[in-house]
Image (spheres, rainbow, N blue to C red):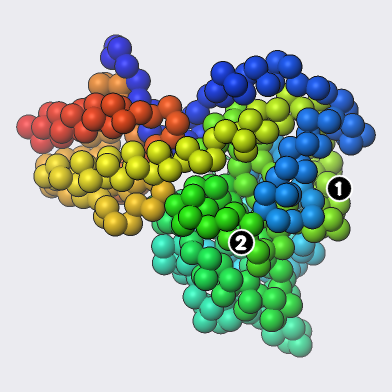
Amino acid sequence: MPDRTIDLRSDTVTHPTPAMREAMYGAELGDDVYGEDPTVNRLEELSAERLGKEAAVMLLSGTMGNLVGILAQTRHGDEAIVGAHSHIFLNEAGGPAALGGVQLHTVPTQRGVMTPDAVEGALRDPRNLHHPRSTLVCIENTHNRDGGAAVPVQAMDTVADVAHRNGLRVHVDGARLFNAAVALDVPIARLVRGADTVQFCLSKGLGCPAGSLLVGDAAVIQEARRWRKMIGGGLRQSGIIAAAGVVALEQMVDRLAEDHRNAKRLAQGLNSIPGLVVDVDAVDTNIIMLDVDDQRVDPKSFVARLREQGVKIGSPYGPRIRLVTHYQVTSDDVDFTLRAAEHALDLVAA
Ligand code: TLP
């Protein structure tokens, strides 16, 4: 067994920091279904304030935040426009269709960006009886499958303008929105100014054990609370979770820049190993997409050999493998990973 483990599979693997554990231990609690958990209330207020919106509601996960955000802004039979590689479309078990009767209409994205033409081209004609109603556009920022791409303000604004001009609302899947804001060096509230709802995760780069927030205007958040209750997400003394969230917002945001620096250095190092290819310029945040480009190397065996040395990376899809940095990955871990990758490649190619 290796004496060291470096887990680069995702930033979801992070454990709460000592400050979070302390805050959780000492959290002031109440029954949140009665709206009486002061710690949840504080986290919700803080989140709304940070994102420049009226209100927020805490949910268990990003998937629940996206689902409730979609359900609160659509009716059965409506259509939501989403990126073809979006997490909502690929990785949320068909929730909008199964639970909301919402059909997803996919459009291409380039580094997370949807063109206004693509969105306009996906709009249905409200006067045509054959068409579903287009009611929502969902933007993912950062974009996971597109390699953690930070979608710039202007691209966010443009899509929001097209949506609003046509009577649609805008939901942002901001599982890693703070990474985007830090990478783009833009105030987070500015980044989501055009959004009607935004979901962001506490349990990715921000290091919490669980939790997501959905923010928006007071009416939509009230509607989201109703949906949350219906799907069994109304929790009681959930200040235990919220306490970590407050610490995350206060202590874990600015340091994301360090994860981005580590990701960049890891990307550069991997790309300099013959047989491995990374588009280093495309590494905006904490996600690296690595391609194995050596006929002799089966990506699955490469991943397995790395794991034997204590380095866990994503499962390959085709030749492509994802690596994610986070606060539990140090600069020294980056050096160790690079040495291990070189060694693993030698073993597999031999
Ligand atoms: N993504 C996970 C996996 O599901 C792929 C990861 O390891 O990256 N939106 C985006 C953009 C996400 O990347 C994720 C999680 C979610 C939503 C869902 O969040 P959770 O896992 O909290 O339901």
1 and 2 marks in contact (CB < 8 Å): no
Q: CA distance from mark 1 to mark 2?
A: 28 Å
Q: Residue at x 77, y 43 (%)?
A: 45
Kind of residue sitting beneath label 1? Arg
Above or below: residue 231 compared with residue 113: above
3 displayed left or right of 48: left
Kind of residue sitting beneath label 2? Arg
Quarter containing ligand 1? Answer: top right
Q: Residue at x 41, y 48 (%)?
A: 285
The response on whether ligand 1 sits within 8 Å of label 1 is no
Q: Residue 190 got which mark?
A: 2
* Image position, residue 58 (x, y; %): 74, 40
Above or below: residue 242 compared with residue 85: above
Q: Residue at x 57, y 75 (%)?
A: 158
Specify the farthest residue to the right: 34
280 displayed left or right of 50: left
Quarter where residue 189 is shown: bottom right
Above or below: residue 3 compared with residue 268: above
- Residue count near mark 1 (Cα–Cα under 10 Å), binned few <14, some 14–19, many ≥20: some
Could you say whether the residue bearing mark 1 is in a helix, strand or loop? helix
Q: Nearer the viewer, residue 158 or 256?
A: 256
